[in-house]
Image: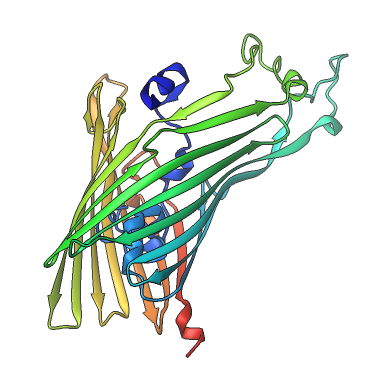
């Protein structure tokens, strides 16, 4: 029923893309390769099954600026264990561009330029996610699910609501960890409401464009992430974590592995930690086939690095993404904070 319904609507190769950027500077420093190893308050985003690794209540916050500080990305989450076999989390994401100049009315009906006719508006994408995780009777196996509500606003012109589900699992065997995250498993359905009066004021701003109202329904197709991680301990104080993920979409894209049925790109992340106090991270992902001017394809990728400090349950992390501008994505400075709230009750 879901498949038939999705085909009857408008499926997009890239829809609700702000949900694919990623959260937590520690994870971004590892190239987003954390599906198997995640285990803190940010697990609601990466893999809700990871919430079962929580021992105390945790709070996470992150801020990032994109496109020369034009776009702002803010994230916050709270998670806590319910009992020995279950955990709960909640998160909020806001991705916005504020104070956009609306110059479509700059020229009045007599053809005169009137700067007083310039106005501003903002566009914002919101996501509210509730997560639940549970440990199964099978040793080392946990599973979880997300329920998410999407709210998108484009000034007074249009707004939408969306609703979707994610599910995830993790399995630990010895030093190995396996993870699977299925996003938008039933497809995420966005319904747009367009203010026709406001739309009419801009529909003729560019000749022969934007003359018709856009479609009011949008479907986000499912995505699948598989990961395998391993932890290596050297002399107790030195810990190396490594993970390899495969991120898949069920539609043809520019990913390095691409077909009409599925497209996929790998992600690789490393984290070195010393005495659980100082961390150094590196990762690479987002491998894409880009068509060059000469007609040939060129493989691009996105390298990231990061550092982190943790003391008495408070972790501060930093990531610099897309080092050396090796992909079309712009590099960004990302900061995040994770707090074990039990430190305030000691």
Whole-percent x and y of residue 331? 41, 50
Front position in the image: 213 or 53: 53
Which quarter of the image is occupied by the N terminus? top left
The single residue placed furthest to the top in the displayed view is 208
Q: In which quarter of the image is residue 106?
A: top right
Can residue 71 be seen in this snapshot?
no
Whole-percent x and y of residue 245? 22, 49
Can residue 142 be seen in this snapshot?
yes
In the rendered picture of this protein, how many numbered marks are placed on residues? 0
Whole-percent x and y of residue 75? 52, 57
The residue positioned 48% from the left and 78% from the top of the image is 341
Q: Viewed as shown, does residue 124 lie left or right of 219?
A: right
The residue positioned 49% from the left and 51% from the top of the image is 129
Q: Viewed as shown, does residue 55 lie left or right of 296?
A: right
How is colour applied across the structure in the image? rainbow
The single residue placed furthest to the right in the displayed view is 110
Front position in the image: 163 or 77: 163
Whole-percent x and y of residue 308? 36, 71
Q: In which quarter of the image is residue 215?
A: top right
The residue positioned 27% from the left and 46% from the top of the image is 285
The single residue placed furthest to the bottom in the displayed view is 346
The residue positioned 39% from the left and 34% from the top of the image is 186
């Amino acid at each position: 029923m879901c498949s038939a319904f999705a085909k009857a609507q408008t499926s997009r190769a890239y829809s609700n893309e702000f949900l694919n950027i990623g959260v937590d500077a520690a994870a971004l420093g590892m190239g987003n390769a954390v599906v198997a190893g995640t285990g803190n308050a940010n697990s609601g985003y990466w893999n809700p099954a990871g919430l079962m690794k929580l021992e105390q209540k945790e709070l996470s916050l992150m801020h990032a600026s994109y496109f020369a500080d034009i776009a702002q990305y803010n994230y916050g989450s709270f998670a806590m264990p319910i009992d020995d076999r279950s955990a709960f989390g909640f998160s909020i994401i806001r991705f916005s561009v504020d104070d956009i100049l609306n110059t479509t009315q700059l020229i009045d009906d007599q053809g005169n330029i009137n700067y007083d006719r310039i106005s501003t508006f903002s566009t914002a994408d919101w996501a509210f996610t509730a997560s639940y995780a549970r440990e199964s009777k099978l040793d080392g196996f946990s599973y979880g699910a997300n329920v998410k509500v999407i709210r998108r606003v484009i000034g007074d012109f249009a707004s939408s609501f969306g609703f979707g589900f994610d599910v995830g699992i993790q399995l630990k065997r010895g030093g190995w960890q396996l993870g699977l995250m299925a996003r938008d498993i039933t497809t995420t359905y966005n319904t747009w409401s367009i203010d026709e009066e406001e739309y009419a004021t801009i529909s003729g701003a560019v000749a022969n464009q934007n003359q018709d109202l856009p479609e009011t329904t949008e479907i986000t197709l499912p995505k699948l992430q598989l990961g395998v991680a391993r932890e290596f301990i050297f002399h107790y104080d030195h810990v190396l974590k490594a993970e390899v993920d495969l991120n898949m979409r069920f539609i043809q894209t520019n990913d390095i592995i691409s077909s009409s049925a599925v497209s996929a790109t790998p992600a690789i992340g490393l984290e070195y930690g010393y005495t659980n106090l100082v961390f150094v991270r590196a990762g690479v992902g987002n491998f894409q086939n880009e068509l060059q001017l000469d007609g040939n394809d060129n493989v691009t990728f996105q390298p990231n690095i990061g550092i982190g400090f943790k003391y008495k349950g408070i972790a501060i992390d930093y990531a610099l993404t897309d080092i050396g501008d090796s992909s079309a994505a712009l590099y960004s400075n990302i900061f995040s904070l994770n707090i074990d709230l039990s430190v305030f009750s000691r």
